[in-house]
Image (cartoon, helix red, strand yellow):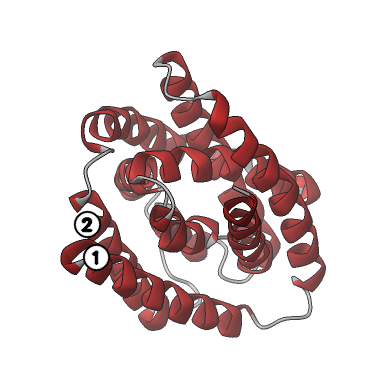
Amino acid sequence: MLIELLIVFIIMFFGSFIQGVSGFGFGLIAMGFLPFLFTVKESTLLVVSLAFVLAASIASQLYKHIQWKTLSVILCGGVLGRIGAFFVLDSFGEQEMLKVYLGLFLLAFVVYLFKNKPPKPGTTVNTTWLPFSLGVVGGLVGGVFAIGGPFFVFYFLLLYYDNKYAYSANLQVTFVVTALMTVTLHGINGDFSLGFLTYFLVGLVSVLIGSRIGILFFKKLSQEKVKRLAAIVVAIAALNLILTTLFF
């Protein structure tokens, strides 16, 4: 039990540090390792619950950079996606093969992290169907696997390619709202156990410390280097998750 708690602490600390520096990555890191200890459903609920606290913590530190007018459409899509994700996770969250699908999603996002390039200055950004579509898909994937961040990242990089503070602040708000929706739905459904509370409290301490340190390094570290390091770690975890589930 103590070893499991220590492992959870380390995983959450690293993931929250990455998110503090780069704006996202907590779910990618955490979901690359937690399914070795828990089911996908248990892992997702723990990560989403802590993601709510983590995003709220970061958003509170960057509050003055939030631009509420740009959030309404993508948030509507994100909430709708989380409602759909609730039914998927509730029905299939205990199945082992879901870990394979998770691993494949993780690998796809690793490719995204390596290939993603900043948008060109002057790029025209659609503010209706694009944010809504990305919100729905990001909400769905985030609600099932807790790794929907890249879909939101894509949109906010288009909007705020020259303002990393507005990019990170608005991104955190989407995480707060969508995570709150998932926690509320699963809470009403009775999916949180007493044992969950122990892991949550350990993770809570970890993400608060990790995110604070990440924010301190926000101005100093190269976000590109941090993302690439995180991508390598996630790729290793994803491959291990797939191979372990299929052959052991």
Instruction: From this view, report whether residue 70 is shown above or below residue 183.
Output: below
Q: Give the residue drawn at x 51%, y 36%.
A: 179
Q: Which residue is disc 2 drawn over?
A: 101
Q: Give the residue drawn at x 48%, y 36%.
A: 178
Q: Amino acid at mark 2?
A: Tyr
**Badge 1 density bin: few <14, some 14–19, many ≥20, Cα 10 Å:** some
**Relative to 40, 233 lies left or right:** right
Question: Dot 1 lies on which element?
Answer: helix
Residue 30 can be seen, yes or no: yes
Residue 71 can be seen, yes or no: no
Q: Amino acid at mark 1?
A: Leu
**Badge 2 density bin: few <14, some 14–19, many ≥20, Cα 10 Å:** some
- Frontmost residue, 212 versus 99: 99
- Frontmost residue, 55 versus 26: 26
Question: Disc 1 vs disc 2: Cβ atoms closer than 8 Å?
Answer: yes
Place of residue 111 in the rendered image (x, y in percent of width and height, measured from the top left): 32, 77
